Amino acid sequence: MKIYRIAVAIILSMITPVHLEASAASKRFDIHLQERQGSFHSFKLVTPEYAKWGNLAMREASKKGYQILDYQYIGKQQINPFVTEQKFKFWVSKQARNFGLYVSIRFESTTERVLNIDYEETDR
């Protein structure tokens, strides 16, 4: 996600003068665009809630030998009041074969302690 933010900042700086502010505590990245007349436009790139789960899913899939080619967030589901599931779909390569891989991460809702990570291969 940091690489994406830096890429956006670099692209924007080529278009117009840019002032950047990063806040690690709030997980927020502010970009202020300055127009030639001196006025500013601001917008915030907010790290999505699922980003840390997506990073974990990618790391764990890589450990299992999958090379990740593409990434899609499927969604979040409350399994019960105590357990939440985040689900992702990757397009992966393994042993010269390309295919889909669903990765589901179940964790305790309050502590965010990972309970299990499930993998399901698919042709699509």
Image: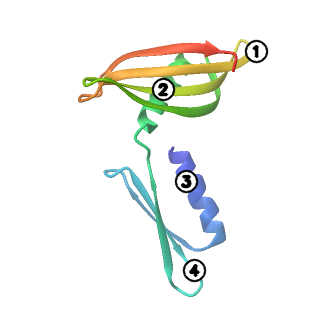
From this view, report whether residue 17 is shown above or below residue 102: below
Q: Which amino acid does label 2 sit on?
A: Lys
Q: Which residue is label 2 attached to? A: 87
Foreground residue among 74 and 64: 74
User: Which comes sooner in the sequence, label 4 or label 3?
Assistant: 3
Residue 49 percent coordinates (x, y): 40, 41
How packed mark 2 is, by other alpha carbons closer than 10 Å (few <14, some 14-19, many 20 or more), is many
Of callouts 2 and 4, which one flags the residue occurring earlier in the amino acid sequence? 4
Rendered image: mark on residue 6: 3
In this figure, which residue is indicated by the disc labeled 4?
35
The answer to whether marks 3 and 1 mark residues whose Cβ atoms lie closer than 8 Å is no
Can you give x and y, in whole percent of width and height, for residue 55 in the image? 48, 32
Find residue 73 and report its horizontal and vertical position in percent. 53, 34
Badge 4: residue crowd in 10 Å (few <14, some 14–19, many ≥20): few
Q: 123 left or right of 54? A: right
User: Does the rendering let one see residue 3?
Assistant: yes
